[in-house]
Amino acid sequence: MSRRGWVLFALMSVIWGIPYLMIKVAVDGVSVPVLVFARTAVGAAVLLPLALRGGGLGRLRRHWKPLVAFAALEIIVPWWLLSDAERHLTSSMSGLLIAASPIIAVVVARLSGGGERLSGTRWAGLGVGLAGVAVLAAPELTGGDPWSIVEVLLTATCYAIAPLIAARRLSDVPALPMTAACLTLAALVYTPAAVWTWPRALPSGQVLAALAGLALVCTALAFIVFFALIREVGTSRALVFTYVNPAVAVVAGVALLGEPLTASILVSFALILGGSVLATMGGAPGEQPGDAPEPARTGQV
């Protein structure tokens, strides 16, 4: 991989590893609809001009049904669920649970008839990864906030299904126009709820900084860097950074928010990461031989 590729890879590892931290800060000052609206509206405002300049928006019309489904499963539903869950869960726990997306993607691809035959290694990866999820979620399910755990796992499931839609139904749609359109649609969907729950007083500087970071860095800039990374190293290599994001989420939560670094977090991190690597060996979930999908998102916040 070239030096430029490594730089882009490192940027993506950080950019999509810190949203959990920023969401945790932002939900303490604004409602979930306002948070998601700010992310999507600003992201759309940045990416739409780029999409219009590059062309390709016209090709979206004949794909509007899968495009709406993709937007719902990649942005509209999961960003609400994750933000609501982080009102009660630590950012590091949320980041680790989302790391189960590749494992869920393997299962979904297999059940939908589009996945490769699972080898013994991949079956072992599924088991190891799910064991990691169980280690992490068990305390919350038995004596904490089980609904928040369910919300994050539903988010991970959405992130697992959305790329399959992109690969199977939107593979001939340019990624930048598709992303800009999805963010615009999400912003429109959240506008009424955001207006209804708009804060009466100006949020703190920390909250405003978190919102700005989510919108400008973790949404708009992230997609630009992601597309550049795909062009530089290809889709398969580009997606490897998703295995680094959980570590960034844990380090950020512990170092900047003082979240606990417990033995269960360390064990679950090793199990989920190891399981994800094993479960996805031998091909991307749902990817058929000869396919070269260019997904707009891959299970990131």
Image (spheres, helix red, strand yellow):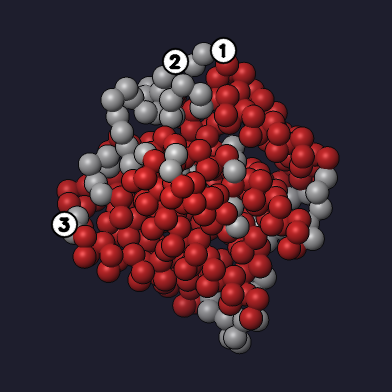
SS of the residue under disc 3: helix
**Quadrant (top left/top right/bottom left/bottom right) for the N terminus:** top left
* Residue at position x 37%, y 61% in the image: 183
Crowding around mark 3 (Cα neighbors within 10 Å: few <14, some 14 to 19, many 20+) is: few
43 above or below 244? Answer: below
Q: Secondary structure at mark 2?
A: loop
The residue depicted at 40 percent of the width and 48 percent of the height is 229
Q: Residue at x 24, y 46 (%)?
A: 173
Q: Position of residue 190 (x, y in %)?
A: 43, 67
Residue where numbered disc 1 is placed: 120
First in sequence, mark 2 or 3: give its number.
Answer: 3
Residue named by callout 2: 117
Disc 2/disc 3 C-alpha distance (Å): 37 Å
Which dot marks residue 168?
none
Which label is found at residue 58?
3
N-terminal-most mark, 3 or 1: 3
In front: 8, or 48?
8
- The reply to whether residue 227 is visible in this rendering is yes
Q: CA distance from mark 1 to mark 2?
A: 10 Å
Q: Quadrant of residue 54?
A: bottom left
